């Protein structure tokens, strides 16, 4: 396992340096994993800077020497919201391959490697702009837009993660929509009752009982009022094409309301009826192949 020192992030955060980990509301598995990760933070002071080791899982703005700004999420945040689990870590330690899309400074991925001992060759990272910290790791690095054509990776992955990166990536689409219409929302309120009926049917598994014209209406209204959703759909199709059988795509779902998830689920199932779609107990959207 590589032991290269990392660039310390310069963070602008509202958090305070907490002395104890707040584990209230977490199940025992996540409590244990959070405690283990927090222990790695204190052990790996040459890898993670003081702000990166904060026990506060709040989000904050971060910047590098090149003045690139983005939302920063502590590795503990991704454990808290089950983007990564003990079972996934065990799988990665035993040879499963991970692609992290929109990894930023790869805080989570560095924790997996330097903290939990996942071999660097099992982790690949990708982003539109590569963070300087990536040059100090042994991860294979890819530079591309998740909404454009994906590169050839050679082999499929068992896990493809989007660690809070989707919300950041769709921000330009939302800004463009707002500038044109002076309005932007994460959901559409038009035909609310009709769309809600289709959404509830999708999550209850009774979509077959809904009229096709009602389903088509929902899809069309969402694509008109939330024009970034077809881009998200195509991105997920690209991810599925690079996922091995039995693998998972996992996204933190803060900026994906259930209305959008229903749209994506219906469209993905039309594309591939074998795809599995679930909303995790805590937060992540999980798409399996």
Image (cartoon, rainbow, N blue to C red):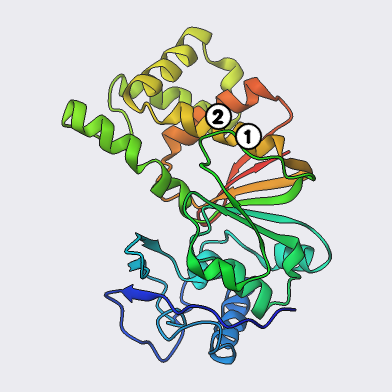
Disc 1 crowd, CA 10 A, few/some/many (<14, 14-19, 20+):
some
Residue 124 location in percent, x, y? 67, 57
Q: Residue at x 51, y 82 (%)?
A: 48
Q: Quadrant of residue 177?
A: top left
Residue 161 location in percent, x, y? 60, 52
Tell me the quarter of the image containing the N terminus: bottom right
Q: Horizontally, is 75 left or right of 151 in the view?
A: left
Q: Nearer the viewer, residue 67 or 276?
A: 67
Residue 234's label in the rendered image is 2
Q: Horizontally, is 215 left or right of 124 in the view?
A: left
Asked whether the viewer can see residue 200, the reply is no
Tell me the quarter of the image containing the C terminus: top right
Determine whether the residue tagged by mark 1 lies in a helix, strand or loop.
Answer: helix
**Residue found at the far top of this picture:** 213
Asked whether the viewer can see residue 71, the reply is yes
Residue that numbered label 1 is attached to: 238
In the rendered view, would you say 277 is above or below 136? Answer: above
Q: Horizontally, is 114 left or right of 264 in the view?
A: right
Q: Nearer the viewer, residue 189 or 113?
A: 113
In the rendered view, would you say 67 is above or below 151? Answer: below
């Amino acid at each position: 396992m590589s032991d290269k020192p990392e660039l310390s992030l310069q963070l602008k955060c509202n958090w305070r340096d907490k002395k104890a980990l707040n584990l209230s509301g977490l199940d025992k598995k996540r409590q244990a994993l959070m405690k283990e990760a927090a222990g790695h933070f204190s052990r790996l002071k040459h890898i993670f800077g003081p702000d990166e080791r904060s026990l506060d899982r709040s989000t904050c703005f971060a910047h590098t020497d090149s003045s690139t700004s983005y939302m920063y999420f502590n590795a503990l945040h991704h454990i808290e919201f089950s983007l990564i689990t003990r079972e996934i870590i065990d799988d990665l330690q035993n040879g499963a391959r991970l692609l992290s899309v929109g990894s930023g400074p790869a805080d989570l991925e560095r924790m997996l490697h330097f903290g939990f001992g996942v071999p660097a060759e099992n982790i690949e990272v990708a982003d539109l702009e590569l963070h300087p910290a990536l040059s100090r790791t042994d991860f294979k690095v890819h530079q591309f837009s998740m909404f454009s054509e994906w590169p050839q990776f050679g082999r499929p992955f068992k896990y493809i993660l989007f660690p809070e990166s989707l919300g950041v990536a769709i921000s330009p689409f939302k800004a463009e929509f707002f500038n044109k219409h002076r309005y932007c929302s994460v959901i559409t309120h038009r035909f609310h009752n009709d769309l809600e009926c289709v959404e509830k049917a999708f999550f209850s598994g009774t979509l077959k009982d809904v009229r096709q014209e009602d389903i088509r209406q929902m899809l069309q209204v969402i694509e008109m009022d939330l024009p970034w959703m077809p881009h998200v759909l195509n991105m997920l199709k690209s991810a599925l094409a690079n996922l091995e059988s039995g693998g998972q795509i996992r996204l933190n779902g803060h900026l994906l309301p259930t209305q959008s998830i229903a749209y994506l689920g219906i469209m993905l199932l039309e594309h591939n009826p074998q795809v599995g779609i679930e909303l995790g107990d805590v937060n992540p959207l999980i798409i399996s192949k």
